[in-house]
Image (cartoon, rainbow, N blue to C red):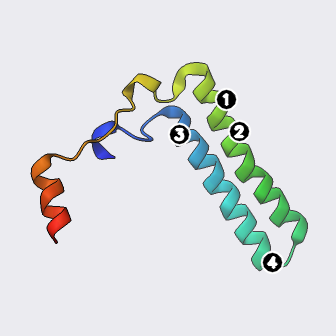
Amino acid sequence: MAGSSHGHTPAAWTGVIIAFIGFCIAGMFMVAAQPWGFWAGIAVVLLGGVVGYIMKMMGLGQPKQNHSVHQVSGEHAQAGAKG
């Protein structure tokens, strides 16, 4: 995946950062035995996905034409089949 810049977009980074913050909130309130805070953290996690999707629709995600199918060369495919 390193050759395709998978996930290196503002939409991906923003969505993951928001979801991570939500995960931390949920974890903190779970340890504190506060169910309302846990569910608030889960809501923030879901918000991260929504924000990332909206940013992708706004053009801040990876363009579709950059997604290429990775092909394995014949030499590597034969070596993998043997061993």
Which one is earlier in the sequence, the residue at label 3 or at label 1? 3
Residue marked by disc 2: 50
Residue marked by disc 3: 12
**Which dot, 3 or 4, sits closer to the camera?**
3
Indicate left or right for 78 with 14 as reference: left
Residue marked by disc 4: 32
x and y percentages locating residue 65 in the rendered image: 40, 23
x and y percentages locating residue 25 in the rendered image: 72, 62
Residue marked by disc 1: 54
Q: Amino acid at mark 1?
A: Ile
* Contact between labelled residues 4 and 3, with CB atoms less than 8 Å apart: no
Q: CA distance from mark 1 to mark 2?
A: 6 Å
* Contact between labelled residues 2 and 3, with CB atoms less than 8 Å apart: no
Q: CA distance from mark 4 to mark 1?
A: 33 Å
Q: Residue furthest right?
A: 36
Q: Secondary structure at mark 4?
A: loop
Work out whether 78 lies above or below 15. below
x and y percentages locating residue 55 in the rendered image: 61, 28
x and y percentages locating residue 69 in the rendered image: 34, 37
